[in-house]
Image (cartoon, grey):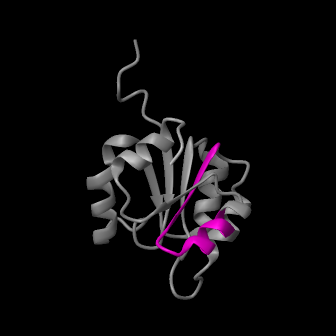
Amino acid sequence: MATEEQSKPRVLVGDDQIGNPGDHCHKNFVYSYGRLADYDFTDNPRRFVEMARTGNYDALVIDLRWGPDIPREGYKVLEETRDYAKIRILHTSENEEARKLGYQHGATHCLEKGCLPEDLEKILKGGEE
């Protein structure tokens, strides 16, 4: 019989803040959503693509803005990771137009930053947002 721990999905999170273990955004993410999955994190978009390619993840959580120097990198990362996980979530606080573009670039879901844990949980369990 599988335990709850064994049944957690594997999720890769890529974000310039959440992906940095020393950042308060990382700590808040883990506090809010940590029970939902087994997570790996990175704050580098190129490293994210490599980890997604080799990591056999159930879901990818991709930030739209990876910092001031690469503000829309999330779209490129979505396209590059399209074949690496069934669930690809664009994680952003941007407007509806940005989310529409997210779907066009390969997102299966778009979530606003700070969403309720139940919203992410529903997606990870195969439901809609």
Give above or below for 54 relative to 114.
Answer: above
Residues in magenta, as a range: 86-102
Q: Is residue 38 visible?
A: no
Residue reaching furthest top? Answer: 1
49 over 122 or under it: above or below: below
**Which residue appears farthest toward the front when viewing the image?**
96
Q: Residue 77 is drawn in which quadrant?
A: bottom right
- Residue at (69, 56) in percent of width and height: 81
Q: Is residue 97 above or below residue 85?
A: below
Q: Quadrant of residue 104?
A: bottom right
Q: Which quadrant does the N terminus fall into?
A: top left
Residue 95 falls left or right of residue 1? right
Q: Residue at x 50, y 48 (%)?
A: 129
The percent coordinates of residue 76 (x first, y second) are 70, 70
Residue 58 appears in the figure:
yes
Of residue 56 and residue 88, the one placed in the foreground of this image is 88
Judged left or right of residue 106, residue 8 is: left
| Whole-percent x, y for residue 34 in the image | 32, 48
Q: How many marks?
A: 0
- Residue 53 horizontal side relative to residue 22, left or right: right
Residue at coordinates 63% horizontally, 51% vertically from top-left? 108
Residue 25 located within the stretch drawn in magenta: no
Please provide percent x and percent y for residue 80. 73, 61
Residue 9 location (% of width, % of height): 47, 37
Residue at x 28% of width, y 70% of height: 24
Name, please, the residue furthest toward the bottom.
69
